[in-house]
Image: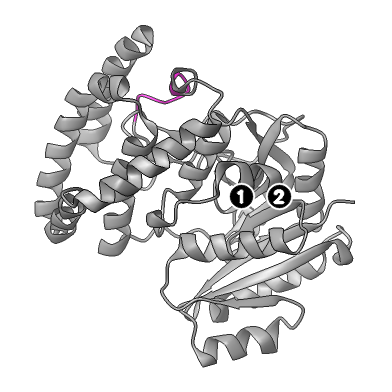
């Protein structure tokens, strides 16, 4: 039986809000307890947060970090799990509750699909009413990549439905709940910790796909996510900066040339939008990051690393990109009726070229 390492990341007082319910659902898992380790990375750790974790989840292995870097915290957990001999590694959000066969079904998904490097759970929105408990709604069935580097969920807020088999995910696996083979994680060199937070699941998934592995959905592995969309200037900075970072890491020069025009127009729009909505400083910080030559050295080093194991041409993966930006929480008429139609038409033209 495969040994599994389960990674949870705490940030400051996050565990005090979500740990107990998550812990209780993990204790009911049908997968034999002796075959999986639970690692909690106490990110931005304090004496108080560490004590809370030890007092409330004694069987978990607590690892400490002090800088708040979410991606580096995941890396620490993944590397420790591999060091401890785990064959499969699971990443899950702490603001979740899992059905008893959640972990078992994730493991079975990889066992039954040797060509898959990652399997994602069916992620449902946590029910808040009796009606939602009877008829849950979907958070994501696998995330979508837009050709300008945006990432977003699929099937958001749609009614839950029965699914058979293991559908292929053409975009990327949500970091809320997925399993990856340890050998695949080692092959691709793990996360790029420069991402800090956001887009890290897109980055990891693209690496896995370029290395020749599929990403699949494990629809019987069900997890409920206490999802809340909250915009902060810190979130906006990392989401937008990491969008550019993903483009520069993964997109070949010819593709960047093809998307230059809509990309430029999008950048102008984002700049104006930042001025209107009060996050102009964050936009300037993003530009400052990419005016620093040292950062391009990191990007170039990562591009070379990707090329060393890449077996799938980028053009094949790019054909799965989408032409519309679908942020379910933002129903902007300008985006919906003007920007998206234009972006989609342009993408149809590019897609024929590639």
| Span highlighted in magenta in the image | 318-324
Percent position of residue 189, x then y: 55, 47
User: For the image shown, how many numbered marks are present on the structure?
Assistant: 2
Percent position of residue 56, x then y: 69, 85
Circle on res. 47: none
Residue appearing at x 43%, y 25% in the figure: 321
Do residues under tags 1 and 2 come within 8 Å of each other at their CB atoms?
yes
Can residue 101 be seen here? The reply is yes
Residue appearing at x 41%, y 53% in the figure: 198
Circle on res. 124: 1
Percent position of residue 265, x then y: 15, 31
Residue sitting farthest toward the top: 352
Asked whether residue 322 is drawn in magenta, I would say yes
Q: How is the image coloured?
A: one colour
Say which of 266 and 335 sits in front. Answer: 266
Residue at mark 2: 222
Q: Is residue 301 above or below residue 49?
A: above
């Amino acid at each position: 039986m495969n040994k599994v390492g389960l990674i949870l990341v705490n940030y400051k007082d996050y565990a005090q809000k979500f740990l107990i319910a998550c812990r209780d659902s993990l204790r009911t898992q049908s997968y034999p307890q002796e075959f999986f380790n639970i690692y909690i990375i106490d990110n931005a750790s304090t004496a108080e947060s560490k004590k809370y974790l030890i007092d409330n989840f004694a069987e978990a292995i607590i690892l400490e970090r002090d800088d708040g870097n979410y991606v580096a915290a995941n890396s620490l957990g993944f590397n420790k799990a591999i060091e401890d001999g785990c064959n499969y590694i699971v990443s899950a959000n702490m603001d979740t509750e899992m059905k008893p066969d959640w972990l078992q079904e994730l493991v079975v998904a990889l066992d039954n699909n040797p060509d898959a490097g990652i399997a994602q759970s069916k992620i449902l929105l946590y029910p808040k009413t009796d009606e939602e408990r009877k008829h849950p709604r979907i958070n994501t069935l696998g995330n979508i990549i837009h050709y300008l580097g945006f990432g977003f969920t699929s099937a958001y807020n749609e009614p839950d439905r029965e699914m058979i088999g293991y559908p292929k995910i053409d975009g990327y696996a949500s970091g809320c709940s997925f399993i990856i083979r340890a050998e695949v994680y080692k092959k691709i060199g793990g996360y790029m910790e420069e991402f800090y937070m956001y887009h890290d699941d897109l980055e990891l998934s693209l690496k896995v796909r370029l290395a020749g592995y599929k990403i699949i959905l494990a629809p019987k592995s069900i997890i409920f996510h206490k999802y809340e969309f909250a915009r902060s200037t810190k979130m906006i900075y990392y989401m937008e900066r990491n969008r550019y970072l993903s483009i520069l890491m993964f997109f070949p020069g010819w593709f960047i040339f093809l998307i230059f025009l809509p990309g430029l127009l999008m950048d102008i729009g984002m700049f104006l939008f930042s001025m209107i909505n009060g996050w102009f400083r964050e936009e300037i910080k993003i530009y400052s990051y990419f005016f620093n030559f040292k950062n391009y050295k990191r990007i170039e080093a990562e591009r070379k690393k990707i090329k060393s194991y890449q077996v799938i041409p980028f053009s094949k993966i790019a054909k799965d990109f989408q032409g519309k930006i679908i942020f379910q929480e933002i129903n902007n008429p300008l985006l919906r009726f003007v920007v998206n139609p234009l972006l989609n038409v342009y993408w149809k033209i590019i897609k024929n070229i590639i």
